[in-house]
Structures are given as C-alpha cells and as structure tokens.
Amino acid sequence: MNPFLLLVPLAAIVAGLANRRRVSRDTETSYRVQFAPHGEAIVPGAEGYVLEGSNGRTLLMLHGSGDTPQSLRYLADRINAAGYTVHAPLLPGHGRSPRAFARATSAEYYAAARAAYGELRGKPWVGLVGLSMGGALLARVASEEREVRALVLLAPYLGAPGLVRFIRRAGMLWSAGVPYVRGGGDTSIHDPVARAESRAYGSFSRGALTALLETADAGRRALSRITAPVLVVNSANDNRIPRDIAEAALRELPVSTEQHWVEGCGHVITVDYCKDEVVRLVLAFLARHAG
C-alpha cells in the first residue's frame, strides 16, 4: 500500500479539527464583541428579573432556547402594569456564551423551571407563560402541579420538523468539523429594530439542539395531563414551527384551549410586529381566569 495514501484521511482530519477550532473561536468572539460578556458572566440585558405587582397574582415566564428574558420584557412590563407580579428567570447556559449554551442539558433546563416554580408555590394565584421552548418546559410543570391557575403557551416548541430531527441525528458527523450552525434568527424576528436588540445566540451546537428536542418531546408528552385553562398563540408565519406540527401537538390537550394565530411576525412573537396583539390576547385571557 502506498504510504502516501494514508496522508489523505489524516490531512482531512487535521483540516476538520482546524476548521472546528476556527468556527468555535469566531462564534465565541462574535458574541463577546457584540455583547461584551466577561468569561461566563451574564451579558448586559440578558439578566432575569422580578417585577412586583399589586393584584396578588403571580406569573412565571420562561424564554426560549438560545434566547433570554429580554425576549419577554415587552410583554412582562405590560402584564406588570395590569397588576401582576412577574418572575422571568434566565435558563442555564443562556445569556452567557455559546460554549455555555452548548454544555447545558434538557435536565438542567427542567430543574431550573421546577426550581423557579418552587419559589412561587403557596402563593394565592400562580400562572405560567412560556415562549417557544419555555412553553414546553412550563407545559410539563403545569401537568405536574394542579395549583397552576392558567397556562399561556406562546409559539410553543412542542415538536420539530423532520429536517431538524435529521440534523440532530447527523450531529456526530457535522459537529466534528462545525461546532456551531446558524439558527435562522433573521427570520425569527421580522422587525429589524427588535432583532438588533435581541440577546439570542443565533447559533446552535449539537448539544443545544439535543437539549431543545428532548425538552420539546417531554413537553408534548405532558399535554394530555394538563388541567389548567390554556391559551395558545402561534404565528402564521413561524419559521421554526410549521402549522401542521403546531396543530397536531395542540390536539393532545384535554382541557378547553383558547387558540389564536397572529400575522406579520416570525417565531418570537413577543418582540416582533405582532407583539401588541399578543399582549392584548394574554391580558384578556388572564382577566378571564384571574378570579
């Protein structure tokens, strides 16, 4: 055997590792330059928050995968102005660095959601509001906690297209050379001003994609056990959740569900052009179930 033929696969491996290091370095540097975090510190504007209300009712709000509580702030401020106390924590691995995001697991996400709800247990009235993956997490919480008074699911990520699942299964191949892939953030938020203000990573790793799909599947399995009244708001132009997948998941809810579709926005409906319609729908639903 010609010994030079052995150099071909060796060179390919070396080139793949070099490309992986370059992509990893460039992705980390880009996020650091844009938001100026220090190491694993939380970037400015991505922090969790508590907004104290006046009506004795409390809402736990969770953001989506790769995003931060910043994506919920517009809605949170208006819900708080209506008297509700709002708790919006930052999920593990988020708002820090792409490396931290890659390491976070679905078990850590759910443990954080449970811990956040545990801090509110015993209050007179507690409702849940989840955006995207946050919706899947809180669907699971609601299925286990009969004291939850209302559940709001905003563009809930309760199922993934076949292509996304294929990309995850092929992760062992592509992640060897490309540690991060773009997540389609430009079409998730149509409003360029809101897109510029986002603290989302804008990229996924194999680990982050696995954590997202595991969380989505667990949330969908929990739907049939939910007893609280549910509001679901989806975008008719959602780039991440096809309408047939959204509708199939929601058919598994046994309770009376109020469902709406909003127009003119992408997946992150709480910051996009439809955000005021989302606020209106959420406040009206909460008012009907806040007794």
Image (cartoon, grey):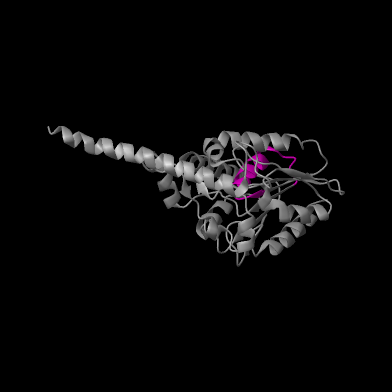
- In the rendered image, residue 224, in percent from the top left (x then y), is placed at 60, 45
- 244 shown above or below 254: below
Residue sitting at the far bottom? 264
**Residue 114: quadrant of the picture:** top right
Q: Does the magenta stretch include residue 137?
A: yes
Our reading of the magenta stretch's main secondary structure is helix
Q: Nearer the viewer, residue 116 or 138?
A: 116
Q: Is residue 24 magenta?
A: no
- Tell me the residue at 59%/34% (across/down): 108
Q: Which of 174 and 11 is in front in this view?
A: 11
Residue sitting at the far right? 54
Asked whether the viewer can see residue 5, the reply is yes
- 204 shown above or below 247: above
- In the rendered image, residue 2, in percent from the top left (x then y), is placed at 13, 34
The magenta-colored residue range is: 130-149
**Where's the N terminus, which quadrant?**
top left
- 11 shown above or below 270: above
**Residue 14: quadrant of the picture:** top left
